[in-house]
Image (cartoon, grey):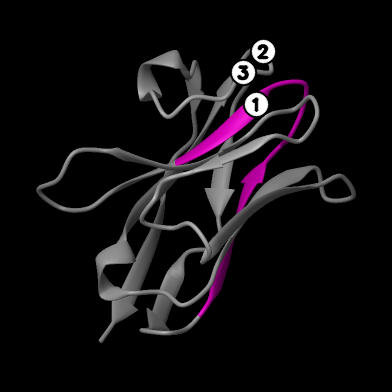
Amino acid sequence: VQLQASGGGLVQAGGSLRLSCAPSGRYSVGWFRQAPGKEREFVAALSWIGGNTRYAESVKGRFTISRDNGKRTVDLEMNSLKPEDAAVYYCAAKMGSAITPDARTYNSWGHGTQVTVSS
């Protein structure tokens, strides 16, 4: 599956952005991010069965991952953004319902979308 992430942009600290990953389907989806000079890190994941979710500790309570069946996307709502959230955000798909923060378990990756947070 070829995924496409969108919705990135420039936002002030404390602001919000909503990223979308299309298309959704019979696979679980994870969001990851990579800042300059840093390794790619897990952000959130959503199982396609049961709607189970998992979040990185750094985004819990601020980010929400969800499926929009009408748009056929998996969205990442990001609130209370901090400068340290700035990164290129990627979505990725994995077969099966189990969700994991391990990027190696994801089979298909989309191009990233840039999120910039000004302080």
Name which quarter of the figure residue 86 lies in: bottom left
User: From mark 2 to mark 1, how far is it between C-alphas?
Assistant: 7 Å
User: From mark 3 to mark 1, how far is it between C-alphas?
Assistant: 7 Å
Q: Which mark is residue 59?
A: none
Query: Residue, x 87% and y 44% (percent of image)?
Result: 69
Secondary structure under tag 3 reads loop
Secondary structure under tag 1 reads strand
User: Can residue 86 be seen?
Assistant: no
Amino acid bearing label 2:
Gly
Circle 3 is placed at which residue position? 98
Q: Is 37 drawn above or below residue 11 in the view shown? A: above
Dot 3: within a 10 Å radius of its alpha carbon, few (fewer than 14), some, or many (20 or more) residues?
some
Amino acid bearing label 1:
Ser
Circle 2 is placed at which residue position? 96
Could you tell which of marks 3 and 1 lies nearer the N-terminus? 1
Q: Quadrant of the C terminus?
A: bottom left
Q: Residue furthest left?
A: 37
Q: Is 65 drawn above or below residue 1 in the view shown? A: below
User: From mark 2 to mark 3, how far is it between C-alphas?
Assistant: 6 Å
Query: Residue, x 36% and y 84% (percent of image)?
Result: 13
Q: Please provide the residue range marked out in magenta.
A: 16-31
Circle 1 is placed at which residue position? 28
